[in-house]
Image (cartoon, rainbow, N blue to C red):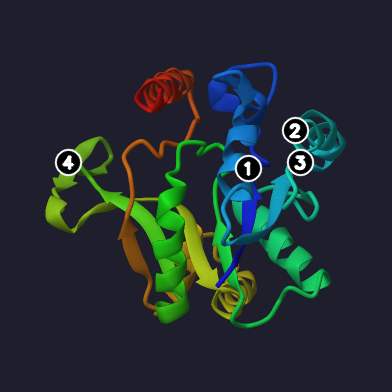
Amino acid sequence: MKATVLVPAAGMGRRMGTSINKQYLDLAGKPILAHTLALFDAHPQIEYIYPILPPDEISYCQQAIIAPYGFNKVRRIVAGGAERQDSVRNGLLALSEDDLDQPERIVLIHDGVRPLFNPQLLAELITIIVEQGACVVGVPVKDTIKEVDNGQISGTPDRKRLWQAQTPQGFSYQLIAEAFRSADEAGFLGTDDASLLERLGVPVQILKGDYRNIKVTTPEDLVMADALFHRQGEGSA
């Protein structure tokens, strides 16, 4: 079974404090987004990739990333929206426009600034989605989490029950499209794609991922990602 990947990368990256958006920052000699797209472009179970970018960056991305690095599975670049949820919705609409909206189609959604995802997990992730309909990659939290109200601790959740959600998050097209339609009708804005299904009571499985699968959002994240890339390179040498 093959999957189609939506790669939202339309964020402005204000926390990074740079003159260019974070997805174009250099990481180990290549733009972050190029590393991310390469994870999927090289995988035999990925059929198509849809990067989702700010409308005024589509031409730049095509010229600076898609063409130079020869990504063969990029079907087209989609214009993003104001919020991440808007961007993913636009990606789902693009699938429909391209006649890729079959109910059973596997749709993976992966942050454009998570270049360290381990693609060896894709086969298992896709299998779970085929069997269960929805699955999210994540890791158990390592720190104690506190609930806080007005600067005061109000509770301490049981850490054994807490996981940190990552991406890819994957669904059958039918499930994720219906979840987005319902969210739009209710004006609901979720914190991730899975939360839209949770709102409807749809079960979502979780697959244990890797703590290295960080989202590069701050300058500190970029330093950590660079160190992890160099460590991977040394390990494969």
Mark 1: amino acid: Leu
Per the image, the residue denoted by label 3 is 54
Mark 3: amino acid: Pro
Mark 2: amino acid: Ile
Which residue is painted at 56% across and 52% down in the image?
43
Per the image, the residue denoted by label 4 is 153
In the picture provided, is 132 more to the left or to the right than 180? left
Which dot, 3 or 4, sits closer to the camera?
3
Residue 17 screen position, x and y as percent = 58, 17
The crowd level at tag 2 (other Cα within 10 Å; few <14, some 14-19, many 20+) is: many
Q: CA distance from mark 1 to mark 2?
A: 9 Å
Q: Residue 37 has which mark?
A: 1
Q: CA distance from mark 3 to mark 1?
A: 17 Å
Q: CA distance from mark 2 to mark 4?
A: 46 Å
Which of these two is toward me, 176 or 212?
212
| Residue 128 visible to an observer of this rendering | yes
Residue 227 screen position, x and y as percent = 40, 19
Which of the marked residues, 3 or 2, is nearer the chain's N terminus? Answer: 3
- Report helix, strand or loop for mark 1: helix
Per the image, the residue denoted by label 2 is 65
